[in-house]
Every structure is written in C-alpha cells, then in structure tokens.
Amino acid sequence: MSRMTTGVPEHASQAELGEGFESALVAAKLGAEWAWAALYRTIAGPVTGFFRVRGVASPEDLAGDVFFELARAIDRFEGDEDAFRTLVFVIAYQRLIEDTQSSSLRRSRSRLAESVLTRLRSDPEAPDVVLQNPADVEEVFRALSPEQRDVLSLRIIGGLTVEQTARVVNKGVTVVRSLQRKGLSKVRNLQTIGESIS
Amino acid sequence: MKRFDLYLRSVWYDLFDRDIDRLIAGRSPDNDDLAPLVGFVTAMKTMGEVSIADLVITDHASVAASMIAARSTSTTDGERYPGRLFFGLQRRLAAALTSLMMLTGLTGVAWAANGAVPGDWNYGIDRALESMGIGAGGARERLEEAMALNETGHTVQALESAAEVLSIEQFKDVGVGLHHAAEAVAKLGRGSDNATQARSRVSQILDYLETHDEIDGKVVSEMAREITDKADREKSNTSTKNSKPAGDSKNDDHEDVEHDGHGESES
C-alpha cells in the first residue's frame, strides 16, 4: 500500500480568519478598511491561483474584480466563513465564464510552468513522484473536460469541499463527485501514457 | 444479483471518494490507484499558490471600504433603494432607452435598473448571486459608488464603475470609451496635476449622468476621450522627461506624492 505525502501542507492555500471572521464581516459591512484587508488576505491567493491555473491573462486584475463585486454583495450576505468562501468562488466562477466568453483568455504557459518548476526544485519536501516537466501537468489538465477542470480547480486550488463546489458550479453533489472521479481517472491514464512514451 | 452489484459499486465509490478527499486535502491516499496522482495534485497546488503584495491588499481594501461608504450614505431608514437618485436614474435610463428604441426601431430590450441585463459583463454574477438569495445591486448603486470613489481619489475605479452603469448594449461604445479612459488615467503619476484634472473631468461625467433625463452617448464618449487623450499626452511627456540627462528631474519628484492620502490604483 502506498504511503506518500504530497509535500504540500493540508489546506496550504486556504488561509482562514477562524474566530475573527464574524467580527471582520460585521466591520466590513460597516466599511472598515482593516476588515476588508483581512478578508481579502484570506481569499486573494486562492482566487488568483484559481484564475491563474485556468489560464486567465491577468489573474490579479480579475481577482480584484471579484473582490469589488463582493463589496457590492456583502451587505446581503449572512453566513459563516465557509459560506463566505463559497460566495467568493461563486463570483469568481462567474467572472471566469464571462472572461472566457469574451475570449480574453490568453495562456501564459511557459511562465507558469517555469515558476512551478523553480518552486518544486527549491522545495526539499517535494515528492519524488514528480512530473519531469510541469508544463505536462498543464497539458494534462487541459485535456480534461471543462466541467472536470471546473471541479478539480475549485477543489484543489480553491480548497472547496464537494458541497461548496456543487454550489459554485450549480450542480448536484453526486455529479461533482462523479466529475472529480472521472477527471482524476483521466489524469492518471494520461500520465501513464506520458510515462510509457517517454 | 444486479442490486448487490449496485450496492458493491456504491460502497466502492464511497471509499474511493473518501480517498480522493484525502488526496486533495494533502494526505496520503490509501488506494494504490490514486498514488500516481499525488504529483499531479502537488503541482496543481503549487501552481495555485499566489502571494499578494500588501500594497495591493490595502489598496483594494480602501476601494471596497469606499464602496461601502457610498452605499451607506445612500441607504437611509433601512430602506434598500430609496431616494430621488435611484428612481431618477431608473426613469432617465428608461427614457434614454425608450428614445433609442424609437430612433433605432429596437424593441423587446429588457432593462432592469436594479440588476444587470443579458449581455452585461456581470449578468452571470447577478444571476448567480440571486440564486444564493443575494442581490447584487444595480445602476443607481454603481453611479453612487463611482461618485464616492472619485471623491476619495479613486478615479480609475470611478471610471470603471461609470462604465458599468453604461454597460448595456446601447451604450456599449461609451462603456468601452470609459474603460480606455480608466486605463489611461491608471498610468498617470500619483497626485499629478493631470490626475487631479482627470478627477475633475470624471466628476463632470458623473454629474452629467446623474442630472440628465436623456443621456447622449456622444457627449459622454467625448468627455471620456478627452480624459484619455490628455492622460496619454501626460504619459508621453513624462517618458520624454525621464529620458533627459540626470540632474534634470527636479520637477518629477512630486509625482510620487499621494494626493489627499489617496492614490490611483495601478493594480
């Protein structure tokens, strides 16, 4: 039986305010700048990463748009931090769809691949099972169906649960589970093919 | 037998799904089938790890706080959409659209002043938020946000908000013009004379949108173009100055000074 660690801490990309969330939310609704900074700090990384993995040309700009849209919706929002995160990704997902439809998606593959390679090389705990070329990861990811990419990027990058992901993509939990099973299965098959070719 | 097969399959799926959750959470999967995916998930997480500069965070937080302030000043007595401005703007835009429809022969245009319409960039977001029981606001709020943002020195964001007010199909070109103006202003030096002038010009645009019963797209486009042209000229002058020999940069220093404590966002 295989026993490996992924080399990435659990919820590495998922900063949380925890007990401070409620007070930050109340203060944010009242327009407190510190509260917005605190909220933004927890979501900016994952949202930007989500856009980046999806090949958005200016992920930082789009993440800013999500944040401003959030400011517009915040006074109608009631819920805990998980619900807040779901709301953030509902907005992010819709922005991604809009961005894709306006055909402004431009891929920055080489830059992304290079940065990943550098980070993996500098991480002493990086797993052995690594992709010789991170561009292959992107290639494999692109081979998935759009729905599989949606689900896997929200789960892995966004740090959402299956239930939260289902809410964001407006599908049932069973469908989301099926999409992630099929998506990961496809990734595994593609990797196997890649290994046999190389 | 078939039912038993289905049962076995569902049990297997449950176990497999739990293992997928472990894999995605960064823990070791028990199932050997998932082991080859550890590298993929790790690489995906590494791709998604992005650190955002504090300056960007504080700037965005400042804009968000200004937007909330704009909303709170326009919302009184617990009413959601009170006031002359909301109904006034709704009426004015409806009148403008009616005029356009009469002129162009267009019919069947759905306009919701309290939300985006099909074709708007944020229509999908509005629909998604509505599905969560959260309305996203409409033209009145966008215009008030734009005014508040401009007053607090966030001219770029003010122009973007104004562009959203006019993002309906009929004013599409005007919206594009405002976006161009926003891009041009974003390149201006912080607190420069031209940034202050741009802010004043944006005020005029917003006043025009607020006070006119019938919006003439050409007027707004022209004002937006003036802002863009002037900002572009300033930018090219600055580039020329910067290319001068060292020792001639005395007058450039003031461009890094914040204006009233607020600078233009260049993020």
Image (cartoon, coloured by chain):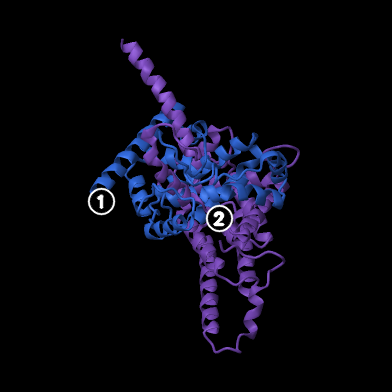
Chain colours: A blue, B purple
Q: How many labels does the image show?
A: 2
Asked if badges 2 and 1 are on one and the same chain, I answer no
Residue A113 visible within the image: yes
Q: Which one is nearer the viewer's eye here, A191 or A158?
A: A191
Circle 1 sits on which residue? A198
Residue type at tag 1: Ser
Q: Farthest residue in the right direction?
A: B77
Secondary structure at numbered mark 1: loop
The image quarter containing residue B130 is: top right
Q: Which residue is drawn at 37% across and 37% down?
A: A184
Chain under callout 1: A
In this rendering, position of residue A109 left or right of residue B241: left
Quadrant (top left/top right/bottom left/bottom right) for the C terminus of chain B: bottom right
Q: Which residue is drawn at 54% across and 72% down?
A: B231
Circle 2 sits on which residue? B51
In this rendering, position of residue B130 left or right of residue B73: left
Horizontal and vertical percent position of residue B263 = 65, 65
Quadrant (top left/top right/bottom left/bottom right) for the N terminus of chain B: top left
Horizontal and vertical percent position of residue B44 = 44, 47
Q: Which one is nearer the viewer's eye here, A82 or A169?
A: A82
Q: Farthest residue in the left direction?
A: A197
Q: Mark 2 Cα within 10 Å, few/some/many (few <14, many 20+)?
A: few
Secondary structure at numbered mark 2: loop
Q: Which one is nearer the viewer's eye here, A113 or B144?
A: A113
Horizontal and vertical percent position of residue B68 = 68, 48
Q: How far apart are marks 2 and 1 (CA)?
A: 34 Å
Residue type at tag 2: Ser
Q: Mark 1 Cα within 10 Å, few/some/many (few <14, many 20+)?
A: few
In this rendering, position of residue B140 left or right of residue B104: right
Task: Please say if the residues under marks 2 and 1 sit with CB atoms less than 8 Å apart.
Answer: no
Q: Which of marks 2 and 1 is in front?
A: 1
